Amino acid sequence: MTANPCQEYARFYETLSPESLDRLSVLTLENIHFKDPFNDVIGQAAMRAIFERMFKEVEAPAFSVNHIICEKNICYLRWRFTGTLKLFGKHALAIEGVSEIVLDEDGRVIEHIDHWDAMNQFLLRMPVFVRLFMVIFGSRISS
């Protein structure tokens, strides 16, 4: 890795493609812990599978990293993800979040935890889920 592993990891996300997924083995540890609102996995292969599924289910997925804050071995990346979800019809996605990145002593990522509001930024934008939540929760859910 380079002298600034957080910037290199952010660049990896901004240029993420099916062809670039092999870089995970260079940037992360074999037993990386990856967690987001829908996944909680251990290992490079499991993390790669999440991205491979994303490329199948989302047209033109793209991350832009807007801010990077690092202190010692912890970095925070503020990002925006855009694309078009192909499930349940086509739905434009625009999700903002923060990734908490923990590095080992060699600058490789050992933990990647995504923090973002799945309910408001994703589920409530899908009509099928809005209808389901309306049945379950009644008028307490607004689309």
Image: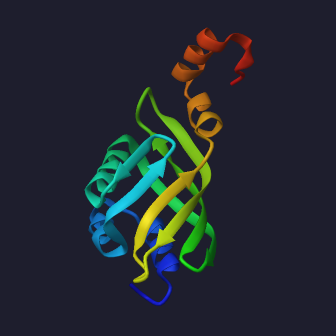
Q: Position of residue 26 (x, y in %)?
A: 31, 75
Residue 1 position (above or below residue 31): below
Q: Quadrant of the N terminus?
A: bottom left
Q: Quadrant of the C terminus?
A: top right
- Rendering quarter of residue 99: bottom right
- Name the image colouring: rainbow
Q: Residue at x 36, y 70 (%)?
A: 28
Residue 4 position (above or below residue 10): below
Q: Nearer the viewer, residue 129 or 6?
A: 6
Decide if residue 42 is on the left or right side of residue 94: left
- Rendering quarter of residue 98: bottom right
Decide if residue 33 is on the left or right side of residue 43: right
Q: Residue at x 48, y 67 (%)?
A: 14
Q: Nearer the viewer, residue 82 or 111?
A: 111
Q: Residue at x 50, y 85 (%)?
A: 4
Q: Nearer the viewer, residue 80 or 117?
A: 117
Q: Position of residue 30 (x, y in %)?
A: 28, 66
How many numbered callouts? 0
Q: Position of residue 44 (x, y in %)?
A: 29, 60
Q: Position of residue 12 (x, y in %)?
A: 42, 70
Decide if residue 57 is on the left or right side of residue 142: left
Decide if residue 80 is on the left or right side of residue 44: right
Q: Residue at x 51, y 60 (%)?
A: 63
Residue farthest along the bottom direction in this orientation: 3
